[in-house]
Amino acid sequence: MAKNDVISVENNITKKDFRKVFWRSFTLLGSFNYEKMEGLAYLYCIEHILKKIYKDDEEGLKQAMLRESAAFNMTIAPAPFVMGISIAMEESVKRDPQF
């Protein structure tokens, strides 16, 4: 297997993108606040993948960023797993807006 295998051909998401999510997840507590808790850092962790998913839809990207910056609070260790689920769900929303 190559180092940067493509995981999602449709959006050109690679293993390297998910490694970037993992390393960025260590910043979750860096922007903690009482309104959204870790929500802003959560968005920071997956922002680059959202830009790949919504590359041709600026309004869709804005809506996705608004969704993903909602209140989020959890232990840092399993957070990348939840981020991966969010990324998969955003891909589903892009394909089917009624999702």
Image: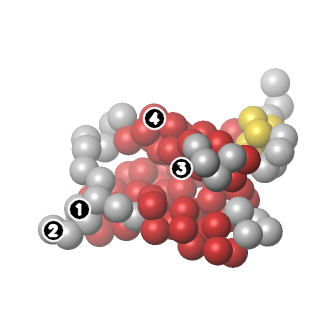
For image coordinates 28% across by 59% down, the residue present is 71
Examine the rendered structure and indicate whether residue 52 appears above or below residue 79. below
Q: Secondary structure at mark 3?
A: helix
**Nearer mark to the viewer, of 1 and 3:** 1
Q: Earlier in the sequence, mark 2 or mark 3?
A: 3
Q: Earlier in the sequence, mark 2 or mark 4?
A: 2
* Residue that label 1 marks: 37
* Residue that label 2 marks: 34
Q: CA distance from mark 3 to mark 4?
A: 10 Å
* Residue that label 4 marks: 81
Q: Secondary structure at mark 2?
A: loop
Badge 1 vs badge 2, beta-carbon distance below 8 Å: yes
Amino acid type indicated by mark 2: Tyr
Name the image quarter holding residue 81.
top left
Amino acid type indicated by mark 1: Met
Examine the rendered structure and indicate whether residue 22 appears above or below residue 58. above
